[in-house]
Amino acid sequence: MNNQTDLAVGTGCALSRALDTGAALTKPQDIGDTKVVVLPEGYAVHDLEKMLPAPARKRGAFVFRDAASFVAYFKRHQAGSTLYGRIDPPGFIAVFDDHRTDEAGWRDHTASYDCPLSREWKTWQAANQKPLKQAEFAQFIEDNLPDIVEPTGADMLEISRTLEAKKKINFASGIRLSNGQQELTYEEQIEGTASKGKLQIPEIFVLGIPVLEGGPRYKVTARLRYRIDSGALVMWFDLLREHKVLEDAVLAVWKEITDATQTTILNGKPDLSA
């Protein structure tokens, strides 16, 4: 066979392979309810959706910082959607192309509101049950004085400044008084003479802070704790049942979203990776 014949045969084989490949690319096969296309090794599928005047369908994961924005977006795409919610950690997810009773959905068009916590809530949570030196505790109280509603700000300011001023004294003991105060006994050296004194601090104080970013303020009760170690005073506070305060805040948003959308919120989190 001469070179021209070999070239013709080779060209014919290549053309045949190209035609076979083209046929494979253009003939989807049905396997059950799913369509598949067999591609030769080394080939790739290119999505040309971007060449269309508009996307073939809605998609995207949208994240909102407040309930009102979440509700507004949900209402724009509400038909056939599903709402999910959870209390701990708090958050809400809307799936606009979710599975239906009789058909599957792509589940890739979503909106979420994760109930971001307020700066005040995070500040007090970070310091909760954390022992601090006397001066450090006094500084913390003074820095966050606007958050304290009981006792008054003036009273707490006086206590914090007294603690700051008496940071070089030796504390001896402490007792709980009948009026709910705690009395600390200390000894102070003044011009070579020992002088004894007493300092009263509240056993309980109350915060008035927002739990969620942009949300209403809630009362949060804190119990003041202390420890005397070799004359040094260490102080901290315990937030009492703060998890119930967070729960109340989230349930209030739960009701707000339910009322605004007239949609039942399912208690849970969808697995959107499946």
Image (tube, rainbow, N blue to C red):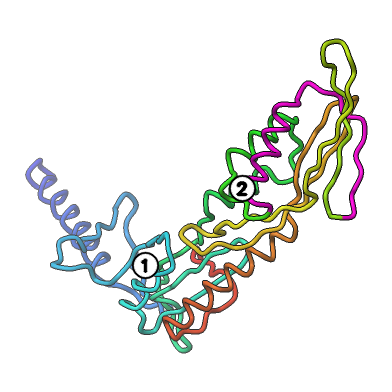
Residue 32 makes an appearance in the image:
no
Left/right of residue 219 with respect to residue 20 in the rendered view: right
Residue range corresponding to the magenta coloring: 151-178
269 and 263: which is toward the camera = 263
Q: Label 2 amino acid?
A: Gly
Q: Amino acid at mark 1?
A: Ser
- 181 in relation to 50, above or below: above
Instruction: Check if mark 2's residue and mark 1's residue have beta carbons within 8 Å.
Output: no
Residue 169 rendering spot, x and y as whole percentages: 82, 23
> Would you say 249 lies left or right of 81 here?
right
**Which residue is denoted by mark 2 in the rendering?**
153
Q: Which residue is mark 1?
A: 69
| Residue sitting nearer the eye, 168 or 137 | 168
Q: Which quarter shows the N terminus?
A: top left
Q: From this view, report whether residue 251 is shown above or below residue 214.
A: below
Q: Which mark is residue 180?
A: none
